[in-house]
Image: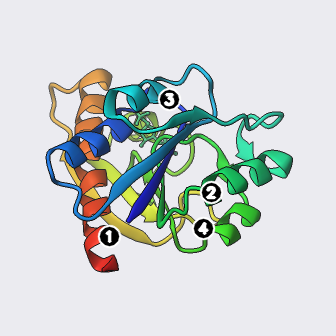
Amino acid sequence: MRVVILGSGRGSNAEAILLAKAAGKLGRAEVVQIFADKPDAGILALGPRFGVPATFLDAAPFKTKLDGSAEQHYIAAISSCQPDLIVLAGFMRVIKPGFLTAFAGKIINLHPSLLPSFPGLDGIGQAWRRGVKIAGCTVHYVTQEVDGGPIIDQAAVHVEAEDTPDSFADKIHAAEHALLPAVIARLSEKKA
Ligand code: GAR
């Protein structure tokens, strides 16, 4: 199963996927390409470290969506990788119908909350400010509804009295780093 990862940030989830692969825990999945929409995104540094092509792909002029000629640029570049699965690992853009149609049923997203609670930006901050006692993360198929596609799997964390915003975020990220590679491995085994 050929996997393309899209990200915008530090890439800790992409790193978790690549570490799982190195440990033989990614099933039949293989990461063939990383793309980032920011030239200075930490995720791009994973390429040389893990021997995977990692490339900046400009999505200007839009800041929060993948649209217009940038969407076409992304579709062409990703299509040339012949992906079986596209993983949005901290890719902070709204995906539009053209991209969804080009890769129908092949796009999954990681979100740092127990959806359908706290969709959109800053899922971790939203959950913390709401004072939930059980939080977590979700991997779901991407549809036109932002953070609203079919849920594949979730992981929960308990919020303890001694937690701080930082320790809470760390718990969510640790849960993400376990959940996302496990989901990819399972999807790859189903593909056969
Ligand atoms: C992750 O917490 C992911 O759930 C979140 O961005 C972070 C990326 O971290 N994604 C979203 O909020 C999408 N709505 P990373 O760059 O270290 O993997």
Q: Amino acid at mark 4?
A: Thr
**Residue at image x 39%, y 45%?**
112
Q: Earlier in the sequence, mark 2 or mark 3?
A: 3
Question: Is the CB–ligand 1 distance for label 4 below 8 Å?
Answer: no
- Point out the image quarter for the C terminus: bottom left
Q: CA distance from mark 2 to mark 3?
A: 23 Å
Q: Amino acid at mark 2?
A: Ser
Q: CA distance from mark 4 to mark 1?
A: 18 Å
Q: Nearer the viewer, mark 4 or mark 1?
A: 1
Q: Can you name the residue that lies furthest to the top here?
A: 40
Q: Callout 3 environment at 10 Å: few (<14), some (14 to 19), or many (20+)?
A: some
Q: CA distance from mark 3 to mark 4?
A: 22 Å
Q: Nearer the viewer, mark 3 or mark 1?
A: 1
Q: Amino acid at mark 3?
A: Gly
Q: In the image shown, does 24 or 94 lie closer to the viewer?
A: 24
Q: Nearer the viewer, mark 2 or mark 4?
A: 2
Q: Earlier in the sequence, mark 2 or mark 4?
A: 2
Q: Earlier in the sequence, mark 3 or mark 1?
A: 3
- Find residue 46 and report its image quarter: top left
- From the image, tell me which residue sits under label 4: 143
Q: In this image, 23 relative to 58: left or right?
A: left
- Point out the image quarter for the N terminus: bottom left
Q: Earlier in the sequence, mark 2 or mark 1?
A: 2
- Find residue 72 and report its image quarter: bottom right
- From the image, tell me which residue sits under label 2: 80
Q: Secondary structure at mark 4?
A: loop
